[in-house]
Image (cartoon, grey):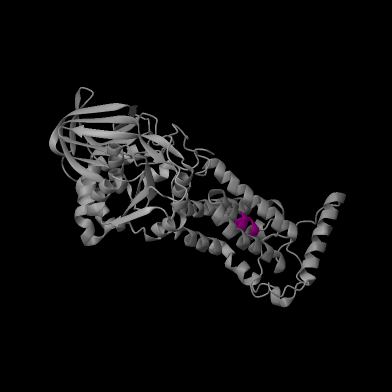
């Protein structure tokens, strides 16, 4: 018989305090068993069974993530991670440390008993641990979703006593272990609220309690109708201009002519266009994320209408850096990243096929075609030496995540370009993977990373592609990347807190 189901160990000793506690635990269990719970009978047994093997919590996490908000997705992921740690702890340590038998079912009415009785030891309750871990993990990332999940978690824990499979102390201990697992996960992976973006340099901007003076230009291609309606309800004085992608720049220019605050709703490319207009007209910018990629808004701390509205209504804003590139007569700005080499070619190749076969298949096909090409996509002179490069990535600010892909920036006004290189050579896929797995400031024969305020490349071949915030353009000859320190004023919640 496995240790989990070996209930033949001697009963606890006659320690007086322990004996009294066990007796009290049994009396509370019998008291609960004898009570009539009319409203619970059709619900709690089913709820208890649905939580077997975490099925209920996986389904709940999927439902939360389906809302497609970043905070909800993080809450769902944190809840599942906490559940996983709690289950591992209970099954490897908890059940094997205290071999307590299950309660005797005699006082429990037959209609409340589970059809299939568990055979593992009783202390602590795994169901209560999973419920508490998931609910606590969700609440640590999103208190609002935590308030939704908490009654369900409490009901699952209660159901274990109601159906007679656990003593009350089993449930309490399991819940405590589950909550502890959630806090342990938070210690390993801090929540978004713990990683507070520096609230400086603070900018003086107008507060618009009802939105009067805010002109919000909305890219209709980003599917933001619900957010626009929420903005109208919360700030009725806002002027909202909805337009197609081709008309975004023209509408932004019109809005800048009479706006006190220029607003934009869309993805990173749309926000980039709005930033150019705001810089040219010296206007503060209010950003509402609404596209597929919203790195700038999320790094700024704006995830939904509530965040942006609160900042605009209170007059909370910061000044942030802007990246700028120039090559001959070609120039532009970037709020997130700028890159040359394999990534711009991947974007171009993906866009060529995405309408025919869909986004993900097009991305895979583009990667295969570009990485198998018998040439380096970029030849440039860097620090006085001609180099073949697979990729040059420059981030507007330091990215705090391992590897090449954009992670999170904690400071949008640090004055640094986060530059990462993948040197030319054989087996580009392995080189790119090695760089992605390496630390952000490591060096090797395959890749390197530095932080600088300005970068100049020479000898760039004609027709070389440069990607900036999702847009692609051609450059040649000399390419300069530099910072415009604290050039853009952007509304951001929480500056005054």
Residue at 52% x, 62% y is 60
Q: Position of residue 235 (x, y in %)?
A: 44, 53
Residue 257 visible in the displayed image: yes
421 sits to left or right of 232: left
Q: Position of residue 127 (x, y in %)?
A: 63, 60
Q: Main secondary structure of the magenta part?
A: helix
Residue sitting at the far left: 462
Q: Nearer the viewer, residue 206 or 151?
A: 206
Image quadrant holding the C terminus, namely top right
Q: Position of residue 163 (x, y in %)?
A: 70, 69
Residue 424 visible in the displayed image: no
Q: Quadrant of residue 241?
A: bottom left
The count of marks equals 0
For residue 297: magenta? Answer: no
Q: Is residue 200 above or below residue 287?
A: above
Residue sitting at the far bottom: 111
Residue at 46% x, 41% y is 315
For residue 131: magenta? Answer: yes
Q: Quadrant of residue 342?
A: top left
Q: Is residue 105 above or below residue 467?
A: below
Image quadrant holding the N terminus, namely bottom right
Q: Nearer the viewer, residue 373 or 284?
A: 284
79 sits to left or right of 173: left
Q: Position of residue 68 (x, y in %)?
A: 42, 57
Q: Nearer the viewer, residue 108 or 228?
A: 228
Residue sitting at the far top: 384
The magenta region covers 128-132
């Amino acid at each position: 018989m496995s240790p989990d189901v070996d209930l033949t160990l001697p009963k606890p000793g006659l320690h007086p305090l322990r004996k009294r506690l066990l007796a009290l635990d049994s009396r509370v269990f019998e008291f609960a068993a004898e009570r009539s719970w009319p409203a619970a009978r059709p619900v709690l047994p089913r709820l208890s069974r649905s939580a077997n093997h975490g099925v209920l919590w996986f389904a709940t996490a999927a439902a939360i993530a389906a809302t497609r908000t970043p905070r909800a997705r993080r809450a769902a992921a944190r809840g599942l991670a906490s559940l996983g740690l709690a289950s591992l702890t209970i099954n490897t340590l908890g059940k094997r440390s205290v071999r307590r038998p299950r309660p005797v079912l005699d006082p429990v009415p037959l209609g409340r008993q589970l059809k299939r009785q568990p055979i593992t030891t009783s202390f602590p309750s795994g169901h209560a641990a999973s419920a508490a871990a998931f609910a606590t993990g969700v609440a640590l990332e999103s208190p609002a979703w935590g308030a939704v999940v908490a009654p369900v978690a409490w009901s699952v824990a209660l159901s274990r006593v109601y159906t007679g499979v656990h003593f009350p102390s089993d449930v309490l201990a399991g819940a405590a272990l589950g909550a502890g697992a959630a806090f342990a996960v938070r210690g390993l992976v801090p929540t978004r609220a713990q990683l507070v973006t520096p609230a400086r340099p603070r900018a003086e901007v107008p507060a618009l309690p009802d939105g009067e003076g805010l002109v919000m230009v909305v890219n209709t291609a980003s599917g933001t109708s619900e957010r626009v309606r929420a903005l109208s309800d919360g700030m009725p004085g806002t002027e909202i201009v909805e337009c197609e992608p081709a008309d975004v720049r023209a509408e932004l220019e019109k809005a800048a002519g009479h706006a006190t605050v220029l607003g934009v709703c869309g993805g990173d490319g749309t926000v980039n266009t709005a930033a150019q207009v705001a810089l040219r007209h010296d206007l503060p910018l209010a950003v509402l994320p609404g596209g597929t990629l919203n790195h700038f808004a999320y790094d700024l701390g704006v995830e939904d209408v509530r965040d942006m509205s609160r900042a605009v209504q209170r007059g909370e804003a910061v000044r942030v850096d802007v990246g700028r590139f120039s090559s001959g007569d070609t120039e532009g700005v970037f709020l997130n990243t700028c890159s040359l080499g394999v990534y711009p070619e991947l974007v171009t190749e993906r866009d060529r096929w995405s309408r025919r076969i869909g986004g993900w298949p097009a991305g895979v096909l583009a990667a295969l075609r570009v990485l198998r090409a018998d040439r380096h996509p970029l030849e440039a002179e860097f620090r006085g030496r001609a180099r073949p490069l697979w990729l040059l990535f420059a981030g507007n600010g330091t990215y705090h995540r391992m590897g090449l892909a954009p992670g999170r920036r904690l400071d949008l006004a640090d004055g640094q370009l986060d530059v990462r290189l993948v040197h030319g050579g054989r087996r580009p896929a392995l080189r790119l993977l090695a760089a992605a797995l390496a630390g952000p400031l490591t060096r090797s024969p395959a890749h390197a990373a530095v932080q600088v305020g300005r970068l100049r490349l020479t000898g760039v071949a004609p027709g070389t592609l440069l990607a900036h915030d999702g847009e692609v353009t051609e450059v040649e000859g000399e390419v300069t990347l530099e910072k415009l320190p604290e050039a853009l004023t952007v509304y951001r919640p929480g500056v005054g807190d």
